[in-house]
Image: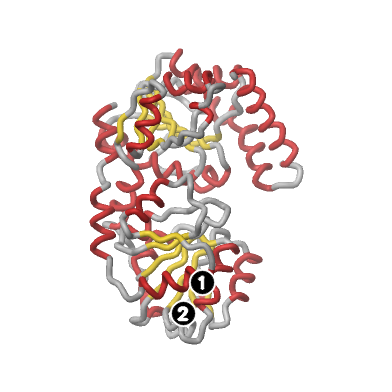
Amino acid sequence: MRLLYTIGVRSYSFMIRIASLWNPKAKKWMQGRQEVWGVLDNWKLDERPVYWFHCASLGEFEQGRPLIEKLKNEEACQVVITFFSPSGYEIRKNYELADLVIYLPQETQANVARFIAKVQPEKVFFVKYEFWAQYIFEAKKAGAAVYSISAVFRKNQVFFKWYGGYLLKVLKAFDHIFVQDEKSADILKNAGVTSTVSGDTRYDRVMGNAKKVQSYPEIENFINGKKVLVIGSSWAEDEAVLMATMNHTNFDWKVIVAPHEIDAKRVTALEAKFTKPSVRYSKLVEGSMADVLIIDNIGMLMNVYQYADIAYIGGAFGKGLHNILEPACFGVPVIFGSSFAKFQEAYDFIENGIGFSVNDAEEFQSRFNKLKALDIRDEVLAFMNDRVGATAEIFTAI
């Protein structure tokens, strides 16, 4: 299995190298890793302990962020953050609480040894789904304590297959694993791995953000007292399900939509889908008569959810469900698509009656009509408040 793991890692890197010839994201992936060693060579350690956080992308960063903030608040330490994906690195490369933000170097024996020797981490945190075997073993060899936080496990993962012995050793190498749910803890227990159910640190993050929410008077003028449907991180597949409802002559709500991608071509295509007047946030002026507001920037969506009466979150028709916690922290019920198997929070929302999955346009219209006749804001907030505390539990344990 170790040989297959190594082959898999190297094959992936080779495919990315080929794809970088035409794919901009793959090109950034390659260029970022070529620049890593120059950045590391110019980075200087001091006497403060180094805590290294590795995140696949932006979503995992948001799960690690509450613990980073608590560590920085409580201790004199250095924080190193590595990303696997350009979508995480490009947005958070200037994160103010990090002492160093870089791409994770490709996992070769030489790169791993060089990285650990340079960074000298005292504690290492792999967030959610990240389990880089050679990095974990090398960090342990160097004397670091290694943790997995906000992790989620499923029975069909390779760790628990008859041929997954090498990767099961990776799990057993962690000093401790903090999981989001009892199901994950039971799966690990059956495999001989100890864990703690601490919950999802993102609940701490979003509930803390909700207390510091920024208002937007120009959006409040746009809403003008009407009910609001906020569509967050949408893709074309999501919009195909929503448009029949929103374009109907009887639909009298305001719509605020923040597409996942905001390049000019994408925003223009989105505008063309609406039969009602729309306006981009960058061109919003007082007295606008538009019914649809398109958020054409990155960074304000979290705050926009405060104006929602119902939220639809995109990605669960193929790309991967985006953040459903952000609207819920304002007491807003959430609708999303049908492909959410890897997202425990979606199951929890559905089980508690605050989140709803739809398969098509007809189901969306039916669910929207039912929700708009209800007020479940208190139930949503109670659910969210019950799940705060993962960060403090992890911090105490480590």
Could you classify mark 2 by the number of other residues whose Cα lies within 10 Å: few (under 14), some (14-19), or many (20 or more)? some
Query: Is 93 located above or below residue 7 in the figure?
Result: below
Query: Which residue occupies the foreground of this view, 213 or 201?
Result: 201
Q: Position of residue 57 (x, y in %)?
A: 51, 42
Tell me where residue 264 sits by quadrant: bottom right
Whether residue 282 is visible here, answered yes or no, is no
**Place of residue 103 in the rendered image (x, y in percent of width and height, measured from the top left):** 55, 35
Is 333 left, or right, of 267 in this rendering?
A: left
The amino acid pointed to by label 2 is Val
Tell me the quadrant of the picture where the C terminus can be found.
top left
Q: Residue at x 43, y 32 (%)?
A: 53
The reply to whether callout 2 and callout 1 are in contact (CB within 8 Å) is no
Q: Earlier in the sequence, mark 2 or mark 1?
A: 2
Asked whether residue 28 is in view, the answer is yes
In the image, taking residue 136 as reference, residue 271 lies left or right, namely: right
Quadrant for the N terminus, please.
Answer: top right
Q: How many marks?
A: 2
The relative height of residue 352 versus residue 244 in the rendered view (above or below) is: above
Choose mark 2 or mark 1, whichever is in front.
1
Residue type marked 1: Glu
**Which dot marks residue 285?**
2
Q: Residue at x 41, y 55 (%)?
A: 324
**Residue beneath disc 1:** 362
Q: Nearer the viewer, residue 32 or 257?
A: 257
Instruction: Point out residue 319 in the picture as x, y percentages from the top left corner.
Output: 57, 52
Disc 2, SS: loop
